[in-house]
Image: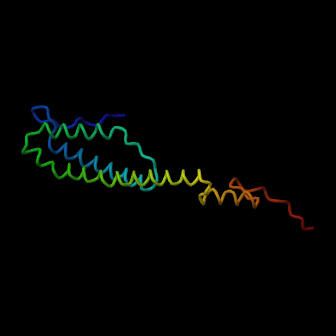
Amino acid sequence: MTRPPSPPLVSDGAESVARIAERATALAGTLDDARAQAEAGILIDLAGLEDRVAHLCLAAEALPRGEARTLLGPLGDLAAALGPLAAALTDQKNRREDAIAAALAGRDDPHTARQRAAVAYGRTAGPAAPALPDDTP
């Protein structure tokens, strides 16, 4: 497997404005994807997010002030993506806590109730039962 190319550097060793903007845009997209997954009830792994944001901010801070100002849009978009993600994660946490509380209180969720009803009526969720022989003469 090949490694991605190194980010372009300017002469003093700092990352280019274009590369930092590209990284900020990509990270904002990652946050938007994470928000969509959280809204769908999928548990997401945000390990490394804080480090990625910190490195991005350090790279922006290393730029001359005039160049850094050009990053206000992409970094602002990144910051704006955090609010909806936080809200989706809070909603997901609340839904899980409600489901756990309901289970502990003895209230059944519809999925479990359907399973019990199927068992009570002799139906299983497994493979279909083998066909019975034909009794006709």
Q: Is residue 1 above or below residue 95?
A: above
Residue 99: x and y, percent?
53, 54
At horizontal 34% and vertical 52% (from top left) the residue drawn is 85
Examine the rendered structure and indicate whether residue 111 appears above or below residue 49: below
Given residues 95 and 133, the one toward you in this image is: 95
Query: In front here: 14 or 136?
Result: 14
Identity of the residue drawn at 24% across and 50% down? 79
Quadrant where the image shows the N terminus: top left
Quadrant where the C terminus sits is: bottom right
Is residue 10 left or right of 31 when viewed as pictured?
Answer: left
The x, y position of residue 53, in whole percent, is: 26, 41
Q: Total label count?
A: 0
Indicate the quadrant where residue 130 lies: bottom right
In the image, residue 30 lies at what x, y percent? 33, 48
Q: Horizontally, is 61 left or right of 36 in the view?
A: left
Which residue is painted at 75% across and 61% down in the image?
A: 121
Outermost residue, bottom side: 136
Give the image's coloring scheme: rainbow
Looking at the image, residue 73 sits to the left or right of residue 105; the answer is: left
Asked if residue 104 is positioned above or below residue 62 in the image, the reply reads: below
Residue drawn at point x = 14 percent, y = 35 percent = 14
Give percent across and percent down for residue 17. 14, 43
17 left or right of 23 in image: left
* Image quadrant where residue 117 sits: bottom right
| Residue at the limit of the structure toward the front, as seen here | 105
